[in-house]
Amino acid sequence: MGVALAGVSIPNFVLGPLLVLGFSLTLYLLPPALWQGPRSRILPVLTLSTAYVAYIARLTRAGMLEVLRQDFVRTARAKGLAEHDRRGQARAQARDPAGGVLHRAGGGARRSWARSWSRPSSRCRGSGATW
């Protein structure tokens, strides 16, 4: 939970140089600049997606905690649902909060996609035409 809180709290203009310092200049795993290929896109994508991933992790945790407090989970445990049957238990409990998480994740993906392909909204000088 601390990692998710840090991911939401640290701004991108701080996280970006820290990732470059760690992965490029210290560990020599990724190129620090230039667009030379797919490896050079990893750091910008990681930097810009950290806040969304942390937000989705916090939503998932809050949803799962809410589901674990509901009556059907307590009833299943009282009827003898084996605690070692984690696979079936997780499948049944993850369906409920998944709707809200997917709803918010889809909105974030839509906003990211729209920002990456949008044209400038400023007016052209003198002509009055817009893009």
Image (cartoon, helix red, strand yellow):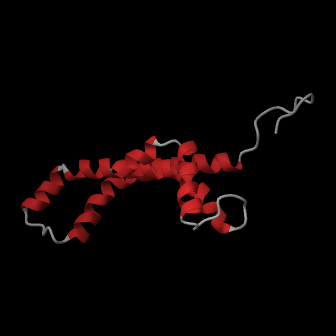
Q: Residue at x 89, y 30 (%)?
A: 125
Spot the residue most to the right: 126
Relative to the observer, which residue lies in front, 109 or 46? 46
Q: Quadrant of residue 98?
A: bottom left
Q: Quadrant of the C terminus?
A: top right
Relative to the observer, which residue lies in front, 112 or 29? 29
Estimate the x, y position of residue 120 in percent, counting from the top left.
Answer: 76, 40
Estimate the x, y position of residue 19 in percent, counting from the top left.
Answer: 54, 55
Estimate the x, y position of residue 106 in percent, counting from the top left.
Answer: 51, 51
Q: Residue at x 76, y 36 (%)?
A: 121
Image position of 130 with respect to 44: above or below: above
Image position of 37 with respect to 129: above or below: below
Q: How many marks?
A: 0
In screen coordinates, is 53 left or right of 121?
Answer: left
In screen coordinates, is 30 left or right of 3?
Answer: right
Relative to the observer, which residue lies in front, 23 or 68? 23
Q: Residue at x 58, y 49 (%)?
A: 17
Estimate the x, y position of residue 59 in percent, counting from the top left.
Answer: 37, 48
Q: Quadrant of residue 79?
A: bottom left
Q: Residue at x 63, y 51 (%)?
A: 113
Relative to the observer, which residue lies in front, 116 or 107? 116
In screen coordinates, is 55 left or right of 108?
Answer: left
